Image: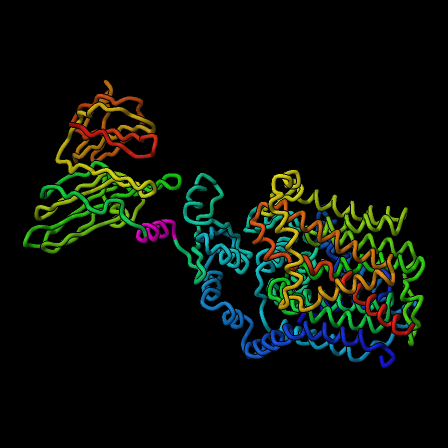
Amino acid sequence: MSERPLIPRIACALLLLSLAVTTLPRLLALVNNARTLLPMGYEARREKQMGPWYVSVETLRRQLPPHEPVALIAGPHDVDSAVFASYYLYPIRTRLFVGRNDYRNASPDPTLPQTIVAVTADRAARTTYDALRDRDLRAGHRVVAAPALSEPRTTFILPMAASLDGPAPETFVIEATIANPNPAPAEVRVTFWPKGMVRTMMIAPGATVAYYDAVHQLFGVLDRGWMRVDSSAPLRAAFYFANRGHGDATLLPNVTGPATGIIAAPIYRDTKLFVINPNATQVTAVVGGVSFPFDPHAFVSWPVTKVPIVSGDVYAFVATRELNGRTDFLWPR
Amino acid sequence: MIGLVVTLVLVPLVGWSIGRRGIGEAFLFGAGLTGALLFLAGVAHVPLVVALALIVVWGVGSGVWELMHHSRTVQSTPHHAIPTIVMCIPLIALTFVAAITPLSDFDGRAFWVLKAKGIAHERAIDGPFFRGATLDPRNHYPILIPLDGAVILGVTHDSDDRQLRWLYLGFLAAFALLIRERIDRLVSPAAGSWCAALLVWIPQIAVEPEGGALSAYSDIALAAFAAGAFFELVSEVSGSRGLAVSRCSAPSTPRDRPTAQPRDRTICFGLWLAFLVLTKSEGLPFALVFLVIGAFVFRKRIVIPAITTVIAAMALFVWRARIPAGDEEDILRMLPTIFGKLHHLGDALAAFPVHMFLFPRWGLFWIAVVIAAVLAWRLDRRAARVAISVIVAMLAVYAGVYVATDWVVSDLIAVTADRLLMHVIAPSLFLLALASSTAQRTKSM
């Protein structure tokens, strides 16, 4: 070495110095970090590195069935977290869905995982599609900001009650507002037909209750049907059939009894006739000249290409979708 | 601990099974052969467990036999103490860190080690894992390194990534030893030792979280395989008429003579190219560049490396045809669109110069390489031409990909340019070694 000329040695030393000036401090930091991790077990080191997120993934790995595929649903900003969750959950098989819409659009796929894990940068947790949907709806805004309340009534029927998703972004809900204008509390009984599910609640004097997704909030289901509202005191109410995906809403009539004279109007696509039997007994109705029996509290629909003539002790209406996606209802007189 | 033993014992033994060589080169050959043979077996639907058993029996048996019965053709040169110590400092520190800290990089967990887990779990390279049963975003990535990882996970019966930390660190150590040994032979022992020391101190390689030695990216492995191929080329150049530096300098200590016969060298060159093809997507264009340059160096003997490269590439394409693609870009399909994306050209051409001068990643390394290229050209035009051709051709290919990409070019450059520069480290270090000898020669004259 002593025979080597000075210039290459200086150049080499300078070059090494330029590298070491960055590498050495970072290397020391890495070594110090390793020293602090040394007394811990390996999993504890990961927990220290990745925080509560890793703890939640570890918990999941113990809880999830090992041979059942899992849907990882993450928001667009949390995809990396989902990729890492997949890594730590393996050999549990995972499919990534960016957002709830991605998952619901895959619903025709027979291999769609039924077990859902919601992943964020903070945690990964097992959940259900309903819970994710409810979380999204709760976080969003109601379509109708200023509902038009009806005249006070103690009993009425809502001919359409739904909490359903179509292909994204179609999200159908009932936005409900119920006000008790009386000086006394009102005991309200809401029945969701044809399932016959009942929910009872008290509304304080002068109070107003509001729901962004009445069917799911009251009955915990994603379904459709009709509702009957019975109250101990007259209530003012407004129920809107809203499509959160499109931001449109239609005020539903507060029906008091059977009606079948549907007003003729233009129809568009996906047109359906809906017939409900509000009675507790079977009835027969004539639809387009053909007689059909309807079970007690039935809720029946079928596609039509024109507004049919309906008669009988039932309530009938038509729903049609405009080209812009808005749902129009043709109510009976 | 078993992962460490497998990495340190099995992999080099497989490398020694095809001839006695330095431990760094043996490690790289072992890793490359194990992964490549398992891949070919997997493509041919030979059960991986059977293939692995054969590799272990053959590799360990013949490796031990080679070690016991064939000494290296000449004694190794004693290495300089100071650069050796300088080289060992980061390697020891990184070993300590790798032993304790869990894997935390992105690509390692998102793609590479996940694939290793998938292969180890299913014992197949086209099982449900690769057929969409689980989230594998880059399904078509070559899997030589994940196959090596799967061997370790399989032998240890543990799917925890802690078992693989040694493999990735091993690639850096082996790379450094390969650099030291080959530049020692080709230029001088001092140059070899210092180049190896420089390599392990480069921030992008030593401590960078994404792509560095503590990550589970495959870029260091690709750079090491490229180094192997490059040194076969330069050895051929020096073997035909000797490097200028070798002719004009008289080392004070005995130097290794190249151990390989010309035929062995072309086989080794071909193996390195096959490893490149099967390690990363960038490996195929890299191998093609080496084949083109190698055609000028090996002339008719380029047929052997061409055959191994074609076999590896065909196997890769057959395997890819059997499994669904992930979200990776298909560069071949994008190439015809390149003329519609010429507005990317400015960003693409500026990518590497800008990143070369990122001091926190590279220090003065690339400035030194540019100066060294000029000096080396003056000393040994042919050897320098080989090194410069490899560097320029590969960076041109990568720049072409930047033009053709559908990603946001600036984003892609930001996350890949430094790692792509790693691939041409070996020819760059060789230029530095040549230049240092140029200065030495000038002084002595």
Q: Position of residue B433 (x, y in %)?
A: 81, 67
Q: Nearer the viewer, residue B160 or B179?
A: B179
Asked if residue B421 can be seen in this view, the reply is yes
Residue at the image position 53 percent from the left and 69 percent from the top: A46
Please say if A216 is above or below A87.
Answer: above
Asked if residue B121 can be seen in this view, the reply is no
**Residue at the far left in the pictured view:** A183
Q: Position of residue B328 (x, y in %)?
A: 60, 47
Placement of the N terminus of chain B among the 4 image quadrants: bottom right
Which residues are drawn in magenta? A128-139
Q: Quadrant of residue B159?
A: bottom right
Placement of the C terminus of chain B among the 4 image quadrants: bottom right
Please say if B277 is above or below A125.
Answer: above
**Residue at the far top in the pictured view:** A289
Q: Quadrant of residue B425?
A: bottom right
Residue at the image position 18 percent from the left and 26 percent from the top: A260
